[in-house]
Each structure stands twice: as C-alpha cells, then as structure tokens.
C-alpha cells in the first residue's frame, strides 16, 4: 500500500498544516477519499462544542473491517497482518496473513450472529493478549456490534460495572491468560462479575490456558466448539454490516475526576480515518515494516495502534502476550531481534523499569532492524529518553513522543519520525488538523512562550470522542464546559520558542500510575468502604519507575488497629474492587484532613506534603484547623 498523504519533510508538514487549518473539511475529505466506502458522505462536518455535537463524513456508509482487511486482499493477502509472540518464548509464535485474518473474522462474525448478537448490541471482551482478542473485536465491528474491551488487570466488580453501564448482553473471554510466570483465571473472574449481571445472555469462551473452568449451561459456549460447527463457505459469503459513519464502533471505559469510569464512545468513520492518518504519519510506516506496540489492547493505545491504525494501513502489527521482564528483562530486545521489528512503541514506565536492569539484557541482541521508537502514556523524563535513544535506538532512531488520550482516539501532538524535529521531553507539534492552544485560569488564550496553561483544542478532528455512553451531559461537563467552545484535555502544558509543546501532566484529579489512568475519587471511594475508615484523600507523588504513585491520607474511626494490618486491608480492597493494578504505596493515618471552612479538602497542600515540598505550602489561614497540617507533616511517610 502506498500512502499519498504521508508527510515527507518539515516544509511539507508546514504547508499541509496550514492547509488543514485553512480548510479542514477539504483536508480531511481528501484523506477520507482513499478509503473503501459503500457510499460516500454528503456532508463532511457538522459541529458545535457547547452541546457537544461532532459528526464527520455525514451520510457515509462503510464497514471498518473492509478497510482493515478486505481491501488488502487484492494485492496483499499473504502479507502478515498479525505476528503474535506468546508469553513463553519457547512456545511457537504465530503469523496471521490478511487472508487468514479475513477468514477468522468472518468465522467469528458468523458465530456471534449465531449466538444472537445484532447490530448495535454491546459486547464486553475480557481476554488476554492473543490474536483472538483482535479477531473478536473485528468480528464485532464486522456485524456492527459495539465492543467494550476491558483490560485483564481489572477486577470482577470493575467488569460488572462496565457490563451494566453499557448493558452488554454478550461477553467474550478466555479460560485464563498467561502473564509472566502467572496464570490469571479470566473466566472465573467473569463468572464472579456476572453474578450481578443476570441479563447477560451468552459468554463465548476461548481456550488459551486449559485452566479448569465452570461452564454455565445455556449461557457459556466454547469458542472452538461453535467455531468448528460453523460452515466456513457460508461464513465467508455473509457481507459485512453496512454502518453509518457516525454509528458507534466501540466503548472504552476510562477514569476521570468522578467516582466511576466513563464509557468513551468512538464512531466508525472518523476514528478510522484519524487512527490511520496518524499511524502512517507519526511512525512513517512503510509497507512491510513490522510495527510492535507493546501496549495492551485493553487500553486505547492498543485499540488505535495495534488494531485499527496498523490494519487499516495494511501493516504488520506485532502483538505480545507477556511482560517486559519475564523470563528476563531482555524480552523486548529478543522480540525485536527475532521478528526484525522496525518500529517499537512503548511507555516511559516500561523504559524506566528496564533501565534498572542495566545493559546485560541487550547482549547478543541484534537491534539493527529498528528504525523508529515511540513513547506514550505519560511525560517521558530526560534520562529515560536518552537511555532509550542510546541503547534501544543506538543513537540512530528518532523517538516520537506521542501525546494523546482515550478521548482523542489517536495521536494529536507528536513529532513525525525523522521528518519533523524531536526534542527530548517535548511532544513538539500538533498533527495537521489539530488546533491546540493554551488557556489561563481566567479563560484567556496564552500567547507567551514557556508559560504553563490548560491544554485545549479549538476545532474538532475526525477521531474525537462523540459522547460518554449513556450520559451525554457528563461528556459536556467534563470536557466542554470549563472553556467556552473548546475541548479541554485535563492536561497542563507550555510551548517553547519553536512552538513545541511540552506536556506537564494532569491538572485534574487523575493519576497516571505506570501509564494507567486512575481517578483519585475512585480510589477514595474504595478506601472509605472499610468499616474502620471515616474518610480519606488520595493524591499522587513522584515515583522513579511508575511515574506517579498513590499517597493516601486516611482518617480512621478511633478503633485501635495495627497500622500495617489496616494498610493491607485497604490494598486488598483496592485490588478486589478496582483491580490488581491499583495499590496505595503510602498510607498515612491522620486525625483529620486539611479542610476549608466550607468543608473542601485542600488537596494542593496534601500534594505538596506527599511530594515533600514542605516549604511554601501556600496560604493555610483559610483552613478550618491549621494545626492539622503540622500533624500531617510530622507523620509523613
Ligand atoms: C493522558 C491520557 C495516549 C494513550 C495512552 C494513554 C498522558 C499520554 C503522553 C505524552 C505526556 C502523556 C496525559 C493524557 N499522556 N501521552 N506523550 N506525554 N503525557 O491514554 O489513559 O487516556 O491517558 O496520558 O496526561 O491526558 P489515557
């Protein structure tokens, strides 16, 4: 495949950017013209941010899987779509060509239809990182069902919350998942989740680990059994469902400042065009390159840059089932060597964790195939950037620092590999079509360099979220209310003299722990469920490897308890209610929290105490009980 819209020089970028801002509709419709449509759109864009309402390629009809699979069958059928590297390096890897992917997606689409899944139905997917996860997602898209993929590190309660919120009547899972030396019993967790979701009609179970599971008669179906009963000739003949541009493609839950995660909704056409365009340009993908994104498909990075971006480009997407440090910390480098990886896209937290193992893991690994490195999920610190550049990239690979969010669908601010300049710790310039700006607290646009402000967008791009599932007002309040007619990202940033953006981090109550997005309110809700706890306040503090970690200030009810016991119970609850990915690293018991007279917790003070910035706590005179601050400082963990 050839990408005529691939930007090839800085000058090119400047011209195209200019054009994209002058006439966004013309710009995006020229790109959208390169896709396979059942019917072209009759209007490019309709939007207003205050409602919000955003519609792209209005009246267009398509199926995203015809763009991600069928159109590649003409010249590219035998090229690998997916290379799958298992958890255990001794297990054989798999290569799945576009032809095979087509067949499997059609088969599973037929299976889902047989199970009663219809267009518009929600399907919750809770699986490990195996090709069948990609196949399941694409099979949903093939028949117009809306997938809601839940990351394997979430608990039964988190799954049932998501299933209920989306009213998903169908679930696809595995018996178990391998993760380093462990097996996670996914099916048992799903069974637990479904005790509060009796409306779920069918659970399709893929056998991966051969872990013993309980199959509920009438509800649970083995993937291999029903697939083998399905006639492939008929399955391959069933046409893909014709979807409207603005029909939902998937829901993905993400944390915000509210107590419950929100279901971010992305639609078929705009998301497809945007993930494709950003993939091809940021990574400068050329055909036959092997693209290895190490993210889990349970997060947006996996949706956009393992599945939809790469496959819509006819790329080879490498999926990895394991973890970076098992059986040893050279796992990434072995994979790069073994599969001749050209593009490696990972997270700063993974880089920092690998840094602690020194250079031995690089021994005897040939990394000469690498052309481009990428970073995503949180700000990358200077030290990690240089280490990545030197030891993975051997000082010859550009690093793309890609800034974006679940809500944005794809990368909005990033250098384009080898095409636009890079600057360590800076995401640099917005992609064409992206009109970024910084706002101050009073709602004025910041024009000065090096001044931190709120990062906003003033014009829609095709990949922007359309709503939060079942609660449009929540979407408006969260993203479109703080600044009139702007999309507010929740991040702070500044711009240098070149106009390069540097993201400084979240300005709301959202933490980034090992790149995972966790709302402090969610954590507090769980902590407060403990009968011996009256209230709590959770903030983030700097952590060498995870980027941020959780510091909880907890008020207990006066019952004499051994503190470490109570700490363990709190962490046990977090794991049970949210998932094993959430743990409070520091828990300090206090007799009260710093509150204003109106009862508002002064988090600013707690954040500073957690970071150890004890001078300059700011104005504490408005506190109800200023003495509490002294007590908290004394007991700092
Ligand atoms: C938040 C979004 C983007 C996909 C994975 C995370 C932070 C993301 C960067 C970056 C600095 C970054 C922001 C953003 N973030 N990429 N390159 N530099 N910060 O998606 O879970 O929706 O999180 O991740 O704070 O708001 P997400």
Image (spheres, grey):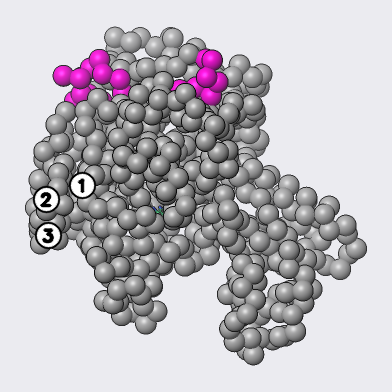
Residue at image point 47% right, 52% down = 383
What's the residue at 20%, 20% (across, down)? 76
Residue 184 in view here: yes
Magenta segment includes 177:
no
Q: Position of residue 235 (x, y in %)?
A: 31, 15
How far across and how far down the image is residue 503, in percent?
39, 61
Q: What residue does disc 3 label?
A: 18
Residue 309, which numbered label? none
Q: Is residue 45 left or right of residue 471?
A: left
Q: Is residue 72 above or below residue 468?
A: above
Q: Choose between 267 and 561: the one closer to the eye.
A: 561
Q: Position of residue 429 (x, y in %)?
A: 26, 58
Q: Is mark 3 within 8 Å of ligand 1?
A: no
Identify the residue at horizontal 53%, vertical 65% (top origin): 509
Task: Give yes or no for contact between labels 1 and 2 (Cβ–Cβ under 8 Å).
Answer: yes
Identify residue for label 2.
12
Could you tell me which secondary element the residue under label 2 belongs to?
helix
> What residue range appears in magenta?
65-91
Image mark for residue 419: 1
């Amino acid at each position: 495949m050839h990408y005529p819209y691939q930007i090839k020089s800085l000058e090119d970028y400047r011209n195209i950017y200019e054009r994209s801002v002058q006439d966004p509709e013309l710009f995006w419709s020229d790109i959208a013209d390169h896709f396979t449509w059942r019917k072209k759109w009759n209007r490019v864009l309709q939007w207003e941010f205050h409602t919000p309402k955003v519609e792209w390629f209005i009246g267009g009809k398509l199926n995203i899987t015809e763009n991600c699979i069928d159109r590649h069958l003409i010249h590219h059928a035998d090229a690998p779509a997916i290379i799958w590297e298992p958890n255990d390096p001794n297990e054989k890897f798999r290569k799945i060509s576009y032809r095979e992917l087509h067949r499997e997606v059609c088969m599973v689409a037929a299976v889902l239809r047989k199970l009663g899944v219809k267009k518009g139905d929600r399907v919750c997917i809770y699986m490990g990182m195996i090709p069948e996860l990609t196949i399941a997602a694409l099979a949903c898209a093939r028949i117009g069902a809306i997938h809601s993929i839940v990351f394997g590190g979430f608990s039964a309660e988190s799954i049932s919350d998501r299933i209920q919120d989306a009213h998903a009547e169908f679930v696809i899972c595995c018996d178990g998942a391998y993760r380093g030396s462990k097996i996670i019993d996914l099916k048992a967790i799903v069974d637990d989740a479904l005790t509060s979701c009796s409306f779920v009609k069918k659970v399709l179970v893929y056998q991966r680990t051969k872990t013993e599971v309980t199959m509920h008669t009438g509800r649970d179906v083995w993937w291999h059994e029903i697939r083998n009963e399905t006639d492939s000739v008929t399955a391959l003949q069933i046409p893909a469902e014709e979807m409207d541009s603005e029909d939902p493609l998937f829901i993905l839950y993400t944390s915000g400042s509210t107590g419950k995660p929100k279901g971010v909704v992305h639609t078929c056409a705009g998301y497809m065009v945007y993930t494709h365009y950003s993939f091809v340009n940021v990574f400068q993908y050329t055909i036959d390159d092997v693209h290895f994104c190490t993210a889990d498909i349970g997060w947006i990075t996996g949706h956009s840059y393992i599945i939809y971006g790469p496959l819509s480009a006819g790329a080879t997407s490498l999926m990895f089932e394991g973890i970076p440090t098992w059986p040893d910390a050279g796992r990434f480098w072995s994979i790069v060597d073994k599969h001749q990886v050209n593009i490696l896209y990972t997270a700063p937290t993974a880089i920092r964790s690998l840094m602690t193992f020194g250079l031995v893991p690089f021994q005897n690994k040939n990394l000469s195939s690498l052309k481009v490195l990428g970073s995503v999920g949180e700000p990358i610190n200077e030290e990690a950037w240089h280490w990545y550049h030197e030891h993975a990239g051997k000082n010859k690979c550009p690093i793309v620092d890609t800034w974006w969010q679940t809500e944005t669908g794809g990368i909005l601010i990033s250098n384009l590999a080898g095409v636009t300049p890079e600057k360590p710790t800076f995401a640099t310039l917005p992609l064409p079509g992206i009109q970024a700006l910084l706002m101050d607290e009073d709602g004025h646009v910041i024009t000065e360099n090096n001044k931190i402000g709120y990062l906003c967008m003033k014009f829609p791009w095709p990949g922007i979220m359309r709503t939060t599932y079942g609660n449009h007002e929540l979407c408006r309040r969260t993203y479109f209310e703080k600044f009139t007619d702007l999309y507010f990202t929740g991040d702070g940033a500044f711009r240098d003299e070149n106009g390069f953006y540097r993201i400084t981090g979240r300005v709301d109550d959202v933490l980034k722990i090992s790149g995972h997005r966790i709302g402090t309110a969610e954590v507090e809700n769980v902590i407060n469920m403990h009968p011996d706890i009256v209230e709590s306040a959770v903030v983030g503090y700097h952590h060498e490897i995870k980027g941020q970690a959780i510091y909880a200030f907890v008020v207990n009810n006066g019952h004499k308890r051994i503190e470490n016991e109570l700490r363990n119970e709190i962490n046990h609850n977090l794991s049970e209610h949210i998932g094993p990915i959430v743990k409070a690293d520091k828990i300090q018991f206090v007799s009260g929290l710093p509150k204003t007279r109106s009862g508002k917790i002064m988090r600013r003070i707690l954040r500073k105490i957690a970071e150890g910035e004890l001078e300059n706590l700011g104005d504490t005179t408005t506190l109800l009980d200023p003495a509490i601050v002294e007590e908290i400082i004394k007991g700092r963990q």
